[in-house]
Amino acid sequence: MKILITGVAGFIGSSLAMELLATGHEVVGIDNLNDYYDVNLKKARLERVSSAGKGAFVFHKINIADKEAMFGLEDSCRDVTHVVNLAAQPGVRYSLINPFAYAETNVMGFVVVAELARRLPKLEQFVYASSSSVYGGNTKTPFSVDDPVEKPVSLYAATKRSDELIAHTYAHLYKMPCTGLRFFTVYGPWGRPDMAAYLFTSNILADKPIPVFNNGEMRRDFTYIDDIIAGIVGVLKNPMRLQPDQVPCRLYNIGNSQTETLMDYISEIEKALGKGAVYNFLPMQAGDVYETFADIEATKRDFGYAPTTTIQEGIPRFVEWYKEFHGV
């Protein structure tokens, strides 16, 4: 396979690139290296991927919403067989501060990537990142892809649901095989500084209080990065069998299918650090949800997806990486 990955300097994108390169595939990577969080972390991930590439990795610094720059890649990407769109403006809370970034990257950028993908003559699959956030305030658990998702509670969630609808349109109009993956709270080495594991670890080590929303009364389906990558690779290896009367569009949950309390998650970080946290209990943040919990039966059936990493295993691995990366 020759795979185009957008967001290749990101947490999931760089991890996916590493796995694909290690198994003999070619990767074309795109990222704009924006400053939403520490650019040095993104550059370190990118250096890691470049070192592993050994000539099989090509990088382009491009904003996916830049139509001219993206379409300029068409000729050089004619052998691309799979496009994985992971570039996005992430985060529920930041969408309250800078909503325009979400419209630009998650909607306009998504359309541009889809337009480029449909022009590639050897394209077999267009795979893209959606999010568990699309389930909004649903109270039925576990969350199934058959559940209604018409009531998002954050702009981030609304843009991700928009992506799913846009993908369906491209599948309908152009018979472009599209697979959306709803990721559930990803964590692990090389993760993002705005996510819970990174933020809590950093604050605990610095003797700063950690923000605990809804007074800790929250549950999440925390999913370790290696399990996420195994799920994506399983999808890439199993393209849809196109039927004449079928719209080639599908959605799957990629989660751990086990919901944990936020306080238990924090406890595992404290154990791994050998140091207790100072808690700053706060009310529920606007746009947030009480619980996420993935129904992954379809993902198991179609791709053999089988997450294996508990937070008791994954958190110590993250903390070990954090200490090494930051020289703690």
Image (spheres, rainbow, N blue to C red):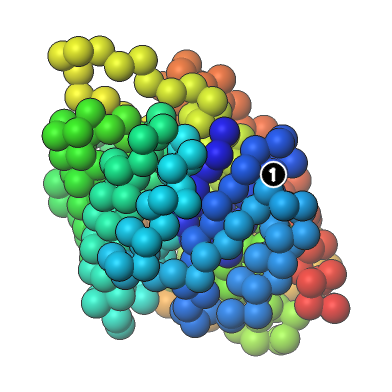
Q: Is residue 305 left or right of residue 20?
A: left
Q: Is residue 133 visible?
A: no
* Residue for point 77% across, 52% down: 54
Figure check: 20 above or below 252: below
* Residue for point 43% across, 43% down: 78
Q: Is residue 151 visible?
A: yes
Occupied quadrant, residue 157: bottom left
Occupied quadrant, residue 315: bottom right
Q: Which residue is mark 1?
A: 21
Q: Work out which quarter of the rendered image holds the N terminus and state it.
A: top right
Q: Amino acid at mark 1?
A: Leu
* Residue for point 23% across, 68% down: 103
Closest to the observer, 16 or 150: 16
* Residue for point 26% across, 50% down: 115
Closest to the observer, 218 or 117: 117
- Residue 112 picture location, percent across and down: 28, 57
Q: Is residue 71 left or right of residue 324?
A: left
- Residue 10 picture location, percent across and down: 55, 63
- Badge 1: few (under 14), some or many (20 or more) residues near its Cα, within 10 Å? many
- Residue 324 picture location, percent across and down: 84, 70
- Residue 83 picture location, percent across and down: 43, 43
- Give the mark count: 1
